[in-house]
Image (spheres, rainbow, N blue to C red):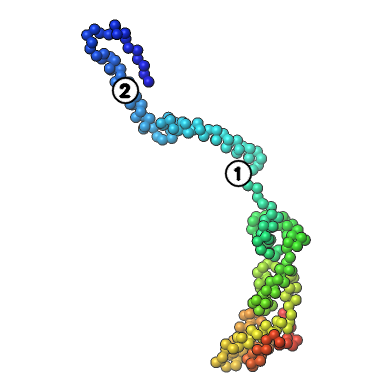
Amino acid sequence: MAVRFLPDPGERPAHGAPDREDLAEVIELRSLLSRRGREAEDRPAGEPGHDGESSAGEAATAPERVGAASEAEEAEELGEAPGSVERPTAKADGVRILARRARSSGELREELLRLDHEPGEVEAVIAEFADSLYLDDLGLARALTEKLRDAKRASRSQIRVKLRERRLPDAVIEEAVGELDAEEEFAILRETAAERARKLGGVDRQTAERRLLGYLARRGWSGEPALRAARDALDGVGGEGRGGCAGGVRFV
């Protein structure tokens, strides 16, 4: 705002004409203010002085910038990345994984390595969990074997494949499979052969036997036990079910 002191009324011209000098100064002042207003409007947004907004914003964010810089310097001194979160240990991840579903030692090893834990740390955790029975490979193998035998009527060969898919050790697999009853195994084989033989009507004996043996082989049965079961089924004596006897047949 401009303040101008007017002369004393006694000093003004007596003829009462308008003060042209005062009028000229007012016009010049308005022109100056108008020009400064246009310059402020033409200044790019964000440049200091544009409507006073950028200057105020910079002043408001200055403390935040200083605080962020201080945090970054402190993290750098501690050897940490700014905003980093503490990473779970292999043991903590192992507990979380086993809480969801039973795992074999091989499955747990794969998952922990996939989470970028050190191999030495992973092996230590697996050994600790095995000692504490958090991991029980043989127990898991037995449970899976029983389920596959009862629900799927799976052969020993099929059971081995499924147990290997669960990353169980070979020694554990052989122990679990070796506990299967041979007579029960042969009874399942005969039942499977009899069910399939009933669907092979209309073909000669040789073709039916070949197809039936191929079917049994795909299900994991082969050799002398499969041949005996196939011939019994085609002869019409394979429907005795679990009452049949293995007759000294050895399954491997």
Q: CA distance from mark 1 to mark 2?
A: 55 Å
- Give me the residue at 74% from left, 80% from top: 181
Q: Quadrant of residue 41?
A: top left
Q: Which residue is nearer to you in this view: 114 or 10?
A: 10
In this picture, is 2 found above or below 13?
A: below
Q: Quadrant of residue 240?
A: bottom right
Secondary structure at numbered mark 1 = loop
Judge whether residue 154 can be spotted in this image. Answer: no
- Give me the residue at 65% from left, 47% from top: 86
Please, which residue is most extreme toward the front here?
A: 9
In this picture, is 48 found above or below 203?
A: above
> Which amino acid lies under the numbered mark 1 shown in the image of this protein?
Gly
Q: Earlier in the sequence, mark 1 or mark 2?
A: 2
> Which amino acid lies under the numbered mark 2 shown in the image of this protein?
Arg
Tell me the number on the disc at residue 192. Answer: none
- Give me the residue at 23% from left, 10% from top: 16
**Residue count near mark 1 (Cα–Cα under 10 Å), binned few <14, some 14–19, many ≥20:** few
Q: Position of residue 35 (x, y in %)?
A: 33, 26
Q: Nearer the viewer, mark 1 or mark 2?
A: 2
Q: Which residue is mark 1?
A: 83
In the rendered view of the protein, which quadrant contains the C terminus? bottom right
Please, which residue is most extreme toward the top here?
A: 10
**Residue count near mark 2 (Cα–Cα under 10 Å), binned few <14, some 14–19, many ≥20:** few
- Give me the residue at 31% from left, 8% from top: 8
Q: Position of residue 196 (x, y in %)?
A: 60, 86
Q: Position of residue 93 (x, y in %)?
A: 67, 56
Q: Which residue is mark 2?
A: 30
Q: Position of residue 7 (x, y in %)?
A: 32, 9
Give the total number of marks visible in the rendering.
2
Secondary structure at numbered mark 2 = helix
Judge whether residue 239 can be spotted in this image. Answer: yes
Q: Which residue is nearer to you in this view: 223 or 88?
A: 88
